[in-house]
Image (cartoon, grey):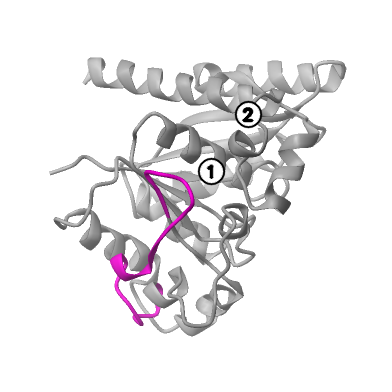
Amino acid sequence: MINTQIISVINQKGGVGKTTTVINLATALSFQQKKVLVVDLDPQGNATTGFGLQSSENSKTIYDVLNGNCTFEESIKNTNIRNLKLVSSNVDLSGLEVETAAENRRAFLLKDKMEEFVNSVSNDFSYILIDCPPSLSLLTVMALVSAKSLIVPLQAEFFALEGLSQLIKTIDRVKENLNPQLHIRGVLLTMFDKRNKLSSQVDSEARQFFENKVYQTVIPRNVRLSEAPSHGKPVLIYDKMCSGSKSYLSFTNEFLKQENIMDSAA
């Protein structure tokens, strides 16, 4: 049976490069012949549109999976990228918290549905990447319960580390009560401006706090990175030569190298 890694990309702050990281890490992994599934767990559906897909009325989304309208497998869609598939999202997902209020095991809804698929013969994915909403809501807790590890994008800007204490408390609480295997795999600095003293300051503070969990690669502020989603393409396809693309390729190599180290330590 294939060993599928389930990784949530999380930060409760919006605009830190979470979705951009999911889209481009998934794309770069697919370029390396890895089979990847992206689960868009954000009601804004930015990962869905970032791959050039729309959730039409008759297509199944993660909302349909969680409310029992379809199986996890039935919600998986092809993208325009080989080896890369998507479970899409739309605004319906924002009603889930109220709709499941009476359910005891609602934090496990996503995990149960995904586990059933991951353990089935249909699963051939090496990675499932979950794009979390920018909040500490039920959806985020579901993503924390479902994943084994986390990637935390951190913008190299003022107050970047402020909101993290709340996130870390939530991670610790989930780890203690719902998912003992959960750990932070790495912290990725985004929106880095090397001309700006503040970026370097956040860099050194983050490395002091998270130590070797911070990736060496930093993602720069880059116009092409911010343009790519409006064209429905990962930046690696929109402009593979720009600094944003080169950084995401470098980050992916570091991510895979980290895996080899983890494998040899196991």
Could you say whether the residue bearing mark 2 is in a helix, strand or loop? loop
Magenta segment includes 113:
no
Q: Mark 1 sits on what residue?
A: 22
* Residue 151 image position (x, y, % from top left): 50, 37
In this picture, residue 44 sits left or right of residue 53: right
In this rendering, is residue 190 above or below 37?
Answer: above
User: Mark 2 is on which residue type?
Assistant: Lys
**In percent of the image, x 70 and y 42: which residue is there?**
16
Nearer-the-camera pick, 94 or 175: 94
**Which of marks 1 and 2 precedes in the sequence?**
1
* Residue 131 image position (x, y, % from top left): 52, 52
Pick out the residue farthest to the right.
196
Could you say whether the residue bearing mark 1 is in a helix, strand or loop? helix
User: Mark 1 is on which residue type?
Assistant: Val
What is the crowding at mark 2: few (fewer than 14 residues within 10 Å), some, or many (at least 20)?
some
The magenta region covers 66-85
What is the crowding at mark 1: few (fewer than 14 residues within 10 Å), some, or many (at least 20)?
many
**In percent of the image, x 48 and y 26: which residue is there?**
252
Q: Mark 2 sits on what residue?
A: 240
* Residue 80 image position (x, y, % from top left): 49, 51
- Residue 217 appears in which quarter of the rendering? top right
